[in-house]
Image (cartoon, rainbow, N blue to C red):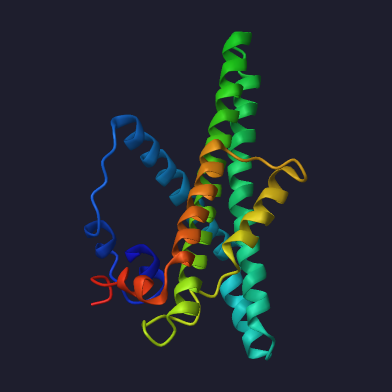
Amino acid sequence: MPTVLHFWSDVDATRITKSTTTLYDEPMEAMAHRLTVDQLDFIMMHELGHVVLDHPRRLKAERDSGFNIKIVRHEFEYAADAFALGLMRSKLVANTRIATEAPDRADDARVKRVTDGLRDYQSSLGGVYLLFVYMDFIQRAGELLQTRLKGKLRLRDAMDSHPRASDRLDRLELTNLGEYLYTSPLERYSRQFMQTVLDYGATLDDEALLQSTIGTLS
């Protein structure tokens, strides 16, 4: 709940870490670190895409012309996502070229490096997809609170000005592999888990749902 309300209200980010205790082993810690790094890399590449594609100036020009900037802003977000994915692919291609063109490497070493690079790419892609699955959950959870508890909670009208996370993920999947979509076991588990949480929230009456926010919005 603190995580949802951080994006939908004025809850400090520190409330997220103070709200619960999480126990995990070393392999889980390593996986969480890797996923976080991959997600932060994608976010940085996404923001770099806005700069490279000159989005701030172009958005201002569209606003000055009286155009509906919501449409333009959404297309810019999709473009920045595609830019970030392109950088991920460029890294894969560069590593593959280095591995295959190295004259001093044995064939089995080249194959291993190419295979390792493909695995790293798929792993990073899985982390990025997981980020959008989580963003979609935050969006839908906030909309559930907004629909059920309107007037009882201090909530924004919308989480942000971006396109829906599910739409952004759909575009990324199609850009990555066309009709042959890639999903990781972790992504599939997360989708099911997040949906279970939302389904549970939907079964609560308004008072129980409101009580779940007590101690967060204070």
Please give left or right for residue 114 compared with residue 211 in the image. Answer: right
Q: Nearer the viewer, residue 83 or 100?
A: 83
Q: Is residue 47 visible?
A: no
In the rendered image, the vertical position of residue 132 relative to residue 9, given as above or below: above
Q: Pick out the residue farthest to the right.
A: 179
Residue at screen point 71% across, 50% down: 175
On the question of residue 209 being in view, the answer is yes
The front one of 145 and 77 is 145
Vertical order, 13 against 99 (above or below): below
Depth check: give the residue in front, 51 or 164: 164
Residue 213 spot, x, y in % from top left: 31, 71
Q: Is 120 left or right of 180, judged from the image as shown?
A: left
Can you say whether 101 is above or below 168 in the image?
A: above
* Residue 151: quarter of image: bottom left
Pick whichever, 200 or 56, lies toward us.
Answer: 200
Place residue 10 in its image quadrant. Answer: bottom left
Q: Residue at x 60, y 71 (%)?
A: 55
Question: At 77% across and 45% down in the image, what residue appears?
Answer: 179
Total count of labels: 0
Image quadrant in which you'd find residue 58: bottom right
- Position of residue 112 measured from the top left corner of the image (x, y, whole percent): 57, 17
The percent position of residue 11, horizontal first and vertical second, equals 30, 72
| Quadrant in which the C terminus is drawn | bottom left
Q: Which residue does the image show at 69% across and 45% down from the upper left?
A: 176
Q: For the N terminus, give its image quadrant.
A: bottom left
Q: Is residue 94 above or below residue 13?
A: above
